[in-house]
Amino acid sequence: MSAAPGKRQATPPAAALGVAPALAARLAKLGLNSRFDLILHLPLRYEDETRVTPIAALVDGAFAQVEGVVESAEIQYRPRRTLLVRVGDGSGTLHLRFLNFYGSQVRALVAGKRLRVAGEARSGYFGAEMIHPRTREVAAGAPLPAALTPVYPTTAGVGQAVLRKAIVAAIAAARDDNALDDTAPAIPGHDLVPFAQAVEALHFPRPGDAVGRDPAAWRRMKFDELLAQQLSLKRAYRSRRSARAPAIAAPPADAADALEARLIAALPFGLTGAQARAFAQIGRDLAGAHPMRRLLQGDVGSGKTVVAALAACRAIDRGFQAAFMAPTEILAEQHHRKLSAWLAPLGVKIAWLAGGLKKRDKDASLAAVADGTAQLAIGTHALFQDRVRFQRLGLAIVDEQHRFGVDQRLMLSRKGAAAAEAPYLPHQLMMSATPIPRTLAMTYYADLDVSVIDELPPGRTPVATRLVAEARRDEVVLRIRAACQSGRQAYWVCPLIEESESLELKTAVETHARLSAALPDLAVALVHGRMKPAEKAKVMDDFSRGIAQVLVATTVIEVGVDVPNASLMVIEHAERFGLSQLHQLRGRVGRGTHESVCILLYQTPLSEAARARLKVIYGSSDGFAIAREDLRLRGPGEFLGRQQSGAPLLRFASLEEDLDLIEAASACADAMLAADDPRVARHLERWLGAREAYLGV
Ligand code: ADP
Ligand code: MG
């Protein structure tokens, strides 16, 4: 982990790429910073320029290459300014049309020039035509390329020809240096070709090679990519095992005066078996001298907070500070309220830190955290900004960890190390209600230990889910009235409008007005993302104390809000939400002993995809099954946090299709690390380069 994470090199040394500095800067924008970045920039598809097709034999809609002589070229002004070039090859005439063109093109495409023209043929009004084809002047009899022409992913500013040239040069240079050798041991039984062969097959496929879709070459690339990820995560895991953390021992089993024992005695409920098991696992990690990095995973409502509170008690009891971080102000505020209610009566001193604090209050909190007066600090990511100094941070708890960006998690994991008298890293407990499917657990989360709470507290009634067409909205409003009249409360979640936050806000305000008018005998409150933290807190407080009966909300309530008396949830335009998001939202009800209902209002007509999604959520209340479906439908992005800037997502391997390769790569990484294989460093350099710092955060 040498490069400073968060600060990627602005301009890579052009020498490393073997190109001019200006081009190097443009390649860097594509994430291409090293020779191997170029070599591993694999084509999206291929075009066949190894053959020339007679104009008379062109097939409508098919890619083809034609060779002929320009017969005429003219600029037309109607209906649009167009450069029209006619090319003939003896078999017929092809019309080339350029809508946006440069003076240089006009000069290059003049009568008499011999051209190779490549593009998609169409049969137009005047006969065969191509819109914006690639053209190249050639001498008669010039040889045709022997390999298919790769088409690389690129952005404006770096053309195919330039990119291709840089890649070809990088491959040639690596070949000369004998640097294309395998950096992994042979893996029998997985149909992998040597790396060098895969590079050749994918960048320069010979015509007929199933148009470049050589499966063995792709499998080699996927395997190597997965191996790099495995090596990197496993190495992070090992290096953490060699770092120091405060050993926080459990109190004697019969110590009734221990903080945790007093909390358990004060709780109005007993722990579930799953909660007790998870706490025991955490306790074992805390007692070790190496930093814990444990993910506490449990479906919404499974009771993760109290387990975290017990872990905090243990740290505090031994004289360490604990920190509790939540991704939103609302959630942090709620934890603050709940943990204060549990722990303040036991004498624990708690500091509150969030973005919206008045300067005086913030300074007081900072001082208490710094001098150790505060034993527990609760807040948003404000907790882990540079200005915050802990006196003796022993345990950092992160709720809804997948909501935090990589950079924030990295900042957190370094926090303890910065404390003056504490040359150790704090233990870390992360919580998530988003279950991680097995393939993800094996890949992106391979360096975490996981505890699962697989049991809900007793007495919960499962949430009944109803799909209701938007046209029946009035009936839904009546249902809300009935629920509230019998003493319950209700959420109304406004549609997610990804394109426009202000439109989302407007809808929420209108919905609030309409519901207030339709339910004059009820107190209808509104909460949305643009409110000031103090306003939000007030609204949430009113709702949790039953002063407001209906809460109209944008998706800000998605995570973690806990109001057990709320038994009805309406989600408007449910078809716009992702599956895990719907599951999280639905988890806001069914937290008390009352029969709970979640109504998914949808707009007709439904697309096939939306129908499929709603069916999944209707048919299942199992977070794991839902997460698996979500992963299948939307890919891993949603699980990995919102701002994975620079985190190397897998580009080639697929979590769905390549389970066998994931398993093989995991085993191979273990073997290589155990044997101290010198190829480890080369493999990581080849595949990750400077990106490695982002893994294992
Ligand atoms: P989540 O896992 O979604 O964060 P919470 O920690 O917010 O869930 O817990 C959900 C609700 O269940 C809270 O009101 C909490 O006090 C309650 N709870 C937690 N553990 C138990 C238990 N063992 N028995 C009964 N209620 C519990
Ligand atoms: Mg929670």
Image (cartoon, rainbow, N blue to C red):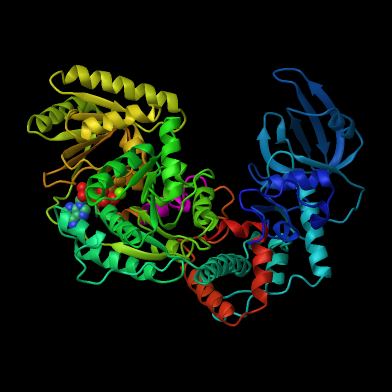
Residue appearing at x 20%, y 58% in the figure: 262
Q: Which percent across, then down, holds residue 145?
A: 81, 57
- 609 displayed left or right of 474: right
Q: Residue furthest left?
A: 486
- 309 displayed left or right of 465: right
Total count of labels: 0
Within the image, what quadrant is residue 221 found in? bottom right
Residue appearing at x 21%, y 36% in the figure: 544
Q: Does the rendering let one see residue 53?
A: no
Position above or below: 49 against 425:
above
Q: Report the magenta residues as a range.
A: 628-643
Front-lying residue, 112 or 640: 640
Is 508 contained in the magenta span? no
Within the image, what quadrant is residue 608 found in? top left
Q: Which percent across, then down, holds residue 697?
A: 51, 57
Q: Secondary structure of the magenta portion, mostly?
A: helix
Q: Does the rendering let one see residue 130?
A: yes
Q: Which quarter of the image is occupied by the N terminus?
A: bottom right
Is 642 contained in the magenta span? yes
- 394 displayed left or right of 593: right
Within the image, what quadrant is residue 35 found in? bottom right
Front-lying residue, 691 or 105: 691
Residue appearing at x 64%, y 42% in the figure: 60
Position above or below: 385 against 211:
above
Residue appearing at x 60%, y 74% in the figure: 192
Position above or below: 477 against 440:
above
Q: Which percent across, then down, holds residue 137?
A: 88, 43
Q: Which percent across, then down, holds residue 439?
A: 43, 64
